[in-house]
Amino acid sequence: MDTIVDRLEKIKLKISSLKSDKLVNVIAVSKSFPLVYIQPLIDHGHAHFGENKVQEAQSKWSEEKNKNKNLKLHMIGKLQSNKAKDAVKLFDYIHSVDNQKLADTLAKHEKNLNKNLNYFIQVNLGNEIQKSGIPVSELDAFYNYCSYEIKLKVLGLMVIPPINQNAIKYFKSLNELNKSLLLENLSMGMSADYIDAIKHGSNFVRVGSSIFGSRSKP
């Protein structure tokens, strides 16, 4: 039976066969799994882990990150402004910057805590009412505001394609938007579609179930 380390290595092998011109970072989405279950990946030397709730991440990772300076923690879920201070303290990357209030709050806490994080702007390409993200029509202005006015380090764009739709068209669109802003990093692709995402320029893929298995049975 495959271990989580075996499964990660198989994913990395698949990715290396694609011969991407970028170094692809596999974010092991460890939300809802206890640290004891994740530990083999940490011991194996894997650095990038993703969480979607600040409170869970604090209890799980605070001590571990103090011990292991190589760990890079990614906030991949929706981030509320009232959790921004705790997020800036703990995380290295935030993939879900989706409104000006949040951006302003993050910039304020960065300054107060003397930290510089890496950010992705979440784009709502499908114009889904229930989904977070900046509308495409507002993206240029929001990117310029984040990067030049409040000095957030924006690495690139992020998208979660609508469920039950062809993800590839969304990957293509986000890649084009990213290039139009002269950005080099893209956060897109999950367990079901990370290969297609990489083929369309992604270099941060968020992979959970393909590594850890079903969330209901850790």
Image (spheres, helix red, strand yellow):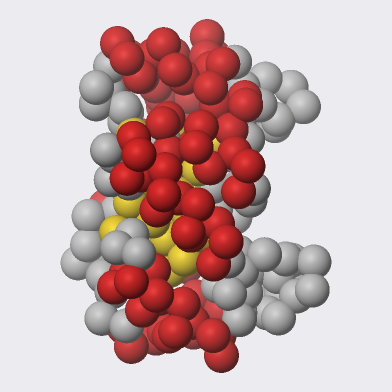
Q: State whether residue 23 appears in this view.
A: yes
Q: Quadrant of residue 132?
A: bottom right
- Image quarter in which the N terminus is found: top right
- In the depicted structure, whether residue 215 falls above or below residue 163: above
- Write the residue at 27% across / 38% down: 114
Q: Toward the viewer: 20 or 45?
A: 45
Q: Is residue 218 left or right of residue 105?
A: right
- Write the residue at 77% across / 27% down: 216
Where residue 34 appears, as percent x and y from the top left, is 59, 15
Where residue 135 appears, as percent x and y from the top left, is 61, 81
- Write the residue at 40% across / 53% down: 107
Where residue 103 appears, as percent x and y from the top left, is 48, 60
- In the depicted structure, whether residue 10 falls above or below residue 105: above
Q: State whether residue 209 appears in this view.
A: no
Q: Quadrant of residue 155?
A: bottom left
Total numbered badges shown on the rendered structure = 0
Where residue 185 appears, as percent x and y from the top left, is 31, 65
- Write the residue at 62% across / 24% down: 56
- Image quarter in which the C terminus is found: top right
Q: Toward the viewer: 81 or 169?
A: 81
